[in-house]
Image (spheres, rainbow, N blue to C red):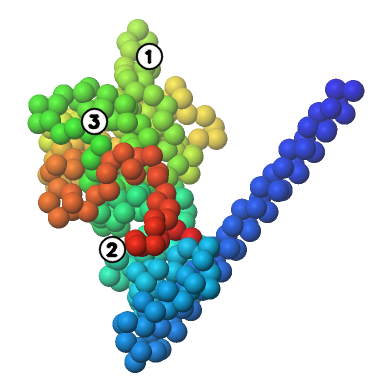
C-alpha cells in the first residue's frame, strides 16, 4: 500500500513538473514573439522616416484606440523599437540573445553598451545567470567584462588540468566590487568579513556563478591546533572547495604561503575523491603584480590574487551608473509603468 501511495505521489510530481516546463516554454515563446514584433515595428518605422517624427505620436494614439488593453505601445516605447531595430541588425543576435531576454533587458543592452560584441557578452551572461534588469545594469556599471576578461594573477594554468584551469580563471575577477559594504579606511579584516557575510546574497552575486557558501571562520584542526578559514565556498561548476582569505592591506608574499597551507588542510580534511583540487583566492586592498607573481611561482597549490574596491572609491561617473544596492541585491525585475513612461517589460 505504501509503495502504491509513493508511486502516486511520484506520478503527481512528474505531471506537475511537465506542466511547469510547458508553461515556461510557452512564456518563452510569447516573449520571443513580442521581441520579434517590436523589432518588426521598429524596422517599419525606419523604412518610412519620410513621415517625420510626429507620425510616431499619431501611431501611438491609433494603437491605443484600436487596442485599448494593450501595453507597450506609447510613443516613447515606439521610438525605442525604432532604435532597437536600427542598432540590432544581426538576425542571429536577435534570435539567440534578444529573443531570450525581456524587452527591459534589451533596452539596457542598447542604451548602456556601444558595441555588438559587448552586447552579446552581457546578453549571454544575463540569460545564463537569470539576471534581473537591476543586476544587468550593475554588472555593466562595474565593468564586469573587463574584470573577467583582463589578465588575472594566478598559477592555475600550471597546477590544474586544462579544463578546470580555464574554468577557474574565468571565475575570477580583478578587482571585485563590494559596493554593498560601508567603506571605512580603519576597517579590520574580521569587520570586512562580517560585512560580507551579513550581505551574503550580494557577496555571492559578486563572486559569480556556482558559488555555495559553506561558512566563515571555518574551523579545521590539525593535531592539537585549530585553524580558521576566513570564508569557505564550494563551487558547483568547478566541483571544488574555494578558500577566500581577506586582507585589508597590500599583498605580501607571506599571504601566499599561508593560503598554500590552508589548501593542503582543506584537501586533507574536506576534499573527497569526487572533488577537484581546492583553490585559494587572496583578496587584498592592493598588490604589486611582480611581487605577487613571484610569490605564487613555486607554490604547490592553485592560488589566485585579486584586489577589491568599494563603491565610494570608484570614479563618480561609474558610481552614478549603479542601481540602488537594495534594488539589485533583491533581483527586482522592473515591469511596466504608465503610458507616459517607457514600458520596459513585456
- Compared to residue 312, the image places residue 255 above or below, namely above
**Rendered location of residue 124, percent (x, y):** 43, 60
Position of residue 234 relative to residue 98, above or below, is above
Please state the horizontal and vertical placement of residue 27, each as a whole percent of the image.
59, 57
Q: Which class describes the residues within 10 Å of circle 1: few (<14), some (14-19), or many (20+)? A: few
**Residue 151 occupies quadrant:** bottom left
Q: Residues within 10 Å of mark 3 (few under 14, many from 20)?
A: many
Q: Residue at x 34, y 23 (%)?
A: 216
Picture coordinates of residue 29 (x, y %)?
60, 63
**In the image, which disc is placed on residue 246?**
3
Find disc 1 in the rendering and name its residue: 221
Query: Percent from the top left, x then y, of residue 219?
Result: 36, 17
Q: Mark 1–mark 3 contact, CB under 8 Å?
A: no
For the residues labelled 3 and 2, the Cα–Cα distance comes to 32 Å
Q: Quick check: 29 left or right of 114? A: right
Q: Earlier in the sequence, mark 3 or mark 2?
A: 2
Q: On the picture, is 275 further left or further right than 283? A: right
Q: Secondary structure at mark 1?
A: strand
Real-space Cα distance between discs 1 and 3? 20 Å
Q: Residues within 10 Å of mark 2 (few under 14, many from 20)?
A: some
Q: Which mark is residue 175?
A: none
Amino acid at each position: 500500500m505504501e509503495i502504491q501511495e509513493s508511486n502516486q505521489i511520484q506520478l503527481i510530481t512528474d505531471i506537475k513538473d511537465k506542466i511547469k516546463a510547458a508553461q515556461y516554454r510557452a512564456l518563452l515563446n510569447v516573449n520571443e514573439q513580442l521581441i520579434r514584433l517590436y523589432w518588426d515595428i521598429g524596422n517599419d518605422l525606419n523604412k518610412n522616416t519620410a513621415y517625420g517624427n510626429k507620425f510616431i505620436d499619431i501611431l501611438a494614439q491609433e494603437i491605443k484606440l484600436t487596442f485599448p488593453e494593450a501595453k507597450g505601445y506609447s510613443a516613447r516605447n515606439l521610438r525605442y523599437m525604432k532604435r532597437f531595430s536600427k542598432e540590432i541588425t544581426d538576425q542571429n543576435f536577435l534570435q539567440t540573445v534578444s529573443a531570450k531576454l525581456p524587452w527591459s533587458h534589451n533596452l539596457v543592452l542598447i542604451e548602456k553598451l556601444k558595441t555588438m560584441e559587448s552586447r552579446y557578452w552581457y546578453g549571454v551572461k544575463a540569460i545564463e545567470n537569470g539576471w534581473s534588469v537591476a543586476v544587468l545594469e550593475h554588472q555593466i556599471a562595474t565593468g564586469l567584462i573587463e574584470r573577467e576578461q583582463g589578465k588575472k594573477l594566478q598559477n592555475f594554468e600550471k597546477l590544474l588540468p586544462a579544463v578546470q584551469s580555464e574554468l577557474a580563471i574565468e571565475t575570477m575577477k580583478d578587482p571585485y566590487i563590494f559596493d554593498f559594504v560601508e567603506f571605512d579606511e580603519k576597517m579590520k579584516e574580521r569587520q570586512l568579513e562580517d560585512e560580507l557575510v551579513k550581505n551574503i546574497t550580494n557577496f555571492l552575486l559578486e563572486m559569480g556563478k556556482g558559488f555555495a557558501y559553506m561558512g566563515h571562520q571555518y574551523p579545521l584542526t590539525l593535531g592539537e591546533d585549530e585553524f580558521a578559514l576566513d570564508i569557505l565556498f564550494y563551487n558547483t561548476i568547478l566541483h571544488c572547495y574555494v578558500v577566500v582569505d581577506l586582507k585589508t592591506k597590500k599583498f605580501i608574499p607571506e599571504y601566499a604561503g599561508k593560503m598554500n597551507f590552508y589548501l593542503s588542510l582543506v584537501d586533507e580534511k574536506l576534499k573527497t575523491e569526487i572533488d577537484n583540487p581546492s583553490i585559494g583566492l587572496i583578496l587584498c586592498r592592493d598588490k604589486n603584480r611582480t611581487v605577487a607573481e613571484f610569490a605564487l611561482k613555486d607554490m604547490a597549490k592553485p592560488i589566485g590574487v585579486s584586489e577589491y574596491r568599494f563603491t565610494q572609491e570608484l570614479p563618480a561617473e561609474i558610481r552614478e551608473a549603479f542601481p540602488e544596492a537594495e534594488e539589485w541585491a533583491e533581483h527586482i525585475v522592473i515591469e511596466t509603468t504608465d503610458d507616459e513612461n517607457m514600458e520596459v517589460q513585456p
